[in-house]
Image: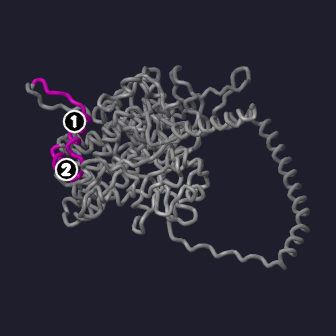
Amino acid sequence: MESVRVPLFLSLLSLLFSSSVSSLATPLNCTDTSRLCTSFLAFKPSKDQTLPILQSMFDVYPEDITVENESKEYVFVKKNCSCTTNKYLTNTTFTVRANGGSVYDMVVEAYDGLALVSNLTMNREAKVGAVVSLRLFCGCSSGLWNYLMSYVMQDGDTIASLASRFGISMDSIENVNGIHDPDNVTVGDLYYIPLNLVPGEPHPTDHGIPPAPVPEPSSDNVTESQGHHESHLSFWWILGSLFVVLGLILIGIVFCICLRSSSCFAEARGNCTKDPDGKSSHKFHVLRTTSFCCTSGRYICCKSGDRKQTNGEPSNSLPNLPKVINTDVFNVEKPVVFTYEEIRTGTDGFSDSNLLGHGTYGSVYYGVLREQEVSIKRMTATKTKEFTSEMKVLCKVHHANLVELIGYTASEDELFLVYEYAQKGSLRSHLQDPQNKGHTTLSWIMRVQIALDAARGLEYIHEHTKNHYVHRDIKTSNILLDGAFRAKVSDFGLAKLVGKSNDGEASTTKVVGTFGYLAPEYLRDGLATTKSDVYAFGVVLFELISGKEAITQTDGMVMKNPERRSLVSLMLAVLRNVPDSTSFSNMKDYIDPNLMNLYPHDCVYKVAMLAKQCVDDDPILRPDMKQVVISLSQILLSSVEWEATLAGNSQVFSGLVQGR
């Protein structure tokens, strides 16, 4: 009797486990709206769907697309997936490339069952250039697998063939999809393939000639080559061992020499001084033979030798730093140190004619230092926290779209930061009433290029630096333009390191920044994340489209009390009446009149929809800056194509070229 109970118990346990796995793993429904994961979509492209077209269809980088190893008929697209409307979905946009038929039919044909097409606007007639926001089916694993891949069942596919094709068991596919009868699957339905590894191989960038097959050795040569190999094996093994032993001995000798001389190494660099008792002290207050640059050397040349002050006397000491500023700020690269006299002379005694503007934490002056144009931020000594923050960030990160820190000086009362000079000033000054301020009106191409530059700068500090940063004060006045109208993100006084948490990268802090640009969750919880920067960037995009400020005034019933309203709420209300670019006329009144109606409607709509995604109340649904860069790159290409059609209009064309 006991022998019967055990198999029965195991059978019941197996059945219970199988059903629980199926219910937990099925990705068709979801409840955790904070969930975000990496997923894949299997797609079978047609011959005319090239790599650039696939990038546009799925809003991804080239490296996010891989191809099937053997047949290469399928591509696998990597996308971020999140839980929304009780389904796992990911966002993209679709551009109509031909007239005729409905948008619904075109989307169904283009994405072959991967797209959610329940939107009523899909039944509208398709027009070339129309841009439609789409959601694609994706899936997040319950933890049993690293990834889930969306796959539309094709004619001839079976659970067994898919299991063999992707190297997994039939049970895994059945459990994930809740399949009870593996012989009863429907062609055209969406199924999920569980994966532990990234599928496919890199997408080919060109059509290279495959290498010629290596001829197989004949049986007569095999025995001879094996004997030849064995006769030389012991000789090479002995020789290799001797080299390894000699290398270890040399490493030991070098290590001993370095260990003995390490106490003098700091003195040789000029950072080490002797205390009266003869011991080494690493207090950073003497600069003997070397000038340390925080920059790449493009702006101020750092030369060996003693410094010369403006009065011609040699200077062998740095300005005294306030005690609250620790010298370990410069733990990666050390900036150029200027004297107060250099700063004062370079700004003509801080004259009003050299004043560029007032910021939150000080005034900014134009100056000339060592024959180079610079911007100099002047702060009181009470702003040491912001001073230190900028030094910590900008001495570690260098990018073409981040303003370059050149150096500093400090006294007991004031702090000065020296930056590269942005000849065209801030983006804000070119958007709000530019003619009255003597600034050039920005064309559409220039605006998209500026947005792309700023997005690349943010993407760099969010994802590509050793330590990831949140800027916390992205706004049009902190986006500077150089002589060619290329953008650089500036003002890192509020920048903050972000650490890993269960919800991703986040850092709890007091709320700082500028109203109109602050994300709702940041205002509510003080949670600074890269997605709060994305929100602020979305506001910047709305400003580029509308020419309005982040907090704008509208005429109220009483002129003395105009209504103050956020630009986000204003633009979102407008976009509710603009479901796609075919309804663009509803949006025209909210586009910057300085553009004089010279812009491609579909591209403006795309930027507006991108801005809308960036300012979503739910940070999980906002794109990351990598996705923003992809979208803006594609919009810029489309805008350039549109520009080419205007070559006959010299006034328009010259204005566009000016921003190149």
522 to the left or right of 302: left
Instruction: Give whichever of 239, 191 is nearer the camera.
Output: 191
Q: Residue at x 70, y 37 (%)?
A: 7
Does the magenta portion include 5? no
Q: Quadrant of residue 30?
A: top left
Does the magenta portion include 581? yes
Residue stretch rendered in magenta on the structure: 560-589
Q: Residue furthest left?
A: 558
Q: Relative to residue 483, is residue 418 depicted above or below?
A: above
- Residue 140: percent from left, percent from top: 49, 42
Q: Relative to residue 290, is residue 77 depicted above or below?
A: below
Disc 2 target residue: 584
181 to the left or right of 249: left
In the rendered view of the protein, which quadrant contains the N terminus? top right
For the question of whether residue 110 can be seen, the reply is: yes
- Residue 125: percent from left, percent from top: 22, 58
Q: Relative to residue 189, is residue 4 depicted above or below?
A: above
Tell me the crowding category of disc 1: few under 14, some 14 to 19, or many 20 or more residues within 10 angstroms, Cα based.
some
Disc 1 target residue: 570
Q: Identify the secondary structure beneath mark 2.
A: helix
Q: Quadrant of residue 438?
A: top left
Q: Relative to residue 203, is residue 391 depicted above or below?
A: above
Instruction: Give whichever of 572, 380 is nearer the camera.
Output: 572
For the question of whether residue 485 can be seen, the reply is: no
Instruction: Give whichever of 30, 284 is nearer the camera.
Output: 30
